[in-house]
Image: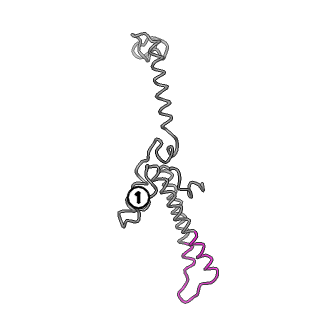
Amino acid sequence: MLAFLFNPSGRIGRAKWWLAQLVVVVIAIFVLVMAGIIKSDADQTLSSMDLTLAAGVVVLAILLLWMTFCVAAKRYHDRNKSAWWYLIQFIPLIGPIWQFVELGFCSGDDAGNDYGPGPDFNIDDDLRTMKMARKTNEAYSTAQRPAYQSASASNNGGRQAFGKRS
């Protein structure tokens, strides 16, 4: 779980990106609540406890920023783009909207790309294996089947009459 949130290498799909956004929102709400606790009246001075809480809020905010970067970097990797695309969010108004749409709604590469195999499974090897098995199966079944017998008849062991086995 920690590698998922704090390591920028690898790839993640949209579902995991949305899950990470939920985690970010929960932590952000926690940080805001902590900041609300720290906030004191203008007449009072900050106590040592308030300074400790303020330091904790700053540390949590830094961890939150790093976590957001790591998750976005992995999502950009799934789209076969560099993590440098994270900087697009700093373009006023357009950047955050662009990043939200691209990471949250656009699909990534199903097969392997420059950043590794697919996020949940590597379908590229599976497809290659299935194609080879189909070619082998077709060559085997056409060699044994007479020309007048349909492929479905050879699969169920007899001649077909109106879709039923005779």
Give the percent coordinates (x, y) of residue 153: 44, 15
User: Closest to the observer: 93 or 148?
Assistant: 93
The residue drawn where x is 36% and y is 66% is 93
What is the basis of the colouring in this image?
A: one colour
Toward the bottom, the furthest residue is: 43
Q: Please name the residue that numbered disc 1 is placed on.
A: 99
Q: Quadrant of residue 63?
A: bottom right
Q: Quadrant of residue 86?
A: bottom left
Magenta region includes residue 46: yes
Give the percent coordinates (x, y) of residue 22: 51, 59
**Quadrant where the image shows the N terminus:** bottom right
Q: Main secondary structure of the magenta part?
A: helix
User: Closest to the observer: 46 or 156?
Assistant: 46
Q: Quadrant of residue 27?
A: bottom right
Give the percent coordinates (x, y) of residue 129: 50, 30
The residue drawn where x is 49% and y is 53% is 74
The residue drawn where x is 51% and y is 45% is 116
- Per the image, label 1 sits on a secondary structure element best described as helix
Looking at the image, residue 130 lies above or below residue 9: above
**Type of residue at label 1?**
Gln
Are there few (<14), some (14-19), or many (20+) residues within 10 Å of tag 1?
Answer: some
Toward the left, the furthest residue is: 94
Give the percent coordinates (x, y) of residue 125: 50, 35
User: Closest to the observer: 41 or 9?
Assistant: 9
The residue drawn where x is 56% and y is 54% is 4
What segment carries the magenta color? 33-59
Magenta region includes residue 36: yes
- Please tell me how many numbered marks the rendered image carries: 1
